Amino acid sequence: MVGESIKWGYILAAPGRPSRKDQIAHLVASGVSDDQFGPIWEDDISRGSTRPQNQLVGRNDLLFAALPGDEIHVHSEFCAAVSKNDARWLIDAVAEQEVRLVVGGEEITTPEDEAAFVAEVARRQNVFHVSESRRVGKKRKRKKVVEVQGPPLPDRRPCVYRHFDADGALLYVGACINHRTREQQHKSQSDWWPDSARVDVEYYGTMREALAAERVAIYFENPAHNKRVVEPHAGAFIEQAARMVEDVSPEAAARILSMKPKSK
């Protein structure tokens, strides 16, 4: 699995963009599937962003997770970037990481494609600002702010985390890149958070390894509050069987692991 290229999906839920439902439908039609390596990545902003590195955490984490040869799919240009400068930065970022950017089903491959992508983001941004001005009945005085595309945010390490209650019962299993940020999200959004008494964190070399491990943990460990269970690949069942007999017979565990299919 580690050697395979992945189709990742990205959704930007923000004013002036297609609905989240439409964006998901496009990604599914493009062959992006969370059956393979976890959920589609997403950002949700309520107003225009002048500092994408601070607000588009999901997109930037996705860029961290993707490896050379992977594809990042988006519904359309304005669902990938928030401004002309941000679009230019994104083009440079995917090129540096040798990741393929697919917009509306078409891959950005040539300098002409890149220029058209940046121009369309700028056009859509202008259209949105005009429509907003008309909606409120007057032009809002906009403060000029220089866009910041700084270095990656700190504390980015792919991991799988497990939350337990006071009795040791497993509440939730998740995978993320920035555990500190994810904990804040759970604190404000997850119904099970008040019952959490302990969290265990296991780190991985890449995000795809963490997402594969998350799938295995949810399937075999049956956490109380994970709503979606996806069957792991065949090798995960062999690994689980080996763990079950390892303490009794390391030799038997080794023989079981030898049955694991080779990664292509």
Image (tube, rainbow, N blue to C red):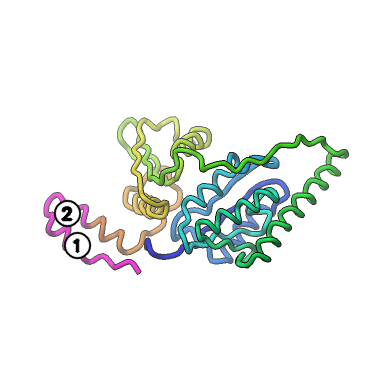
Q: Secondary structure at mark 2?
A: helix
**Residue 116 percent coordinates (x, y):** 71, 62
Residue at the (54%, 47%) spot, across then down: 60
**Residue 124 percent coordinates (x, y):** 75, 53
> For this rendering, which residue is in front, 260 or 64?
64
Q: Residues within 10 Å of mark 1 (few under 14, many from 20)?
A: some
Q: Is residue 244 magenta?
A: yes
Q: Which residue is mark 1?
A: 256
Hey, which residue is sitting farthest right in the picture?
A: 137
In which quadrant of the rendered view does residue 171 lie?
Answer: top left
If you read the primary sequence from the N terminus, does the residue marked by circle 2 or circle 1 appear first? 2
Seen in the image, is 18 located left or right of residue 233? right
Q: Is residue 119 above or below residue 161?
A: below
Seen in the image, is 43 located left or right of residue 68? right
**Residue 50 percent coordinates (x, y):** 67, 40
Residue at the (80%, 44%) spot, across then down: 132
Seen in the image, is 26 located left or right of residue 195? right
In which quadrant of the rendered view does residue 23 lie?
Answer: bottom right
Q: Are marks 2 and 1 in contact (CB under 8 Å)?
A: yes
Labelled disc at residue 212: none
**Residue 72 percent coordinates (x, y):** 55, 59
Q: Which residue is mark 2?
A: 245
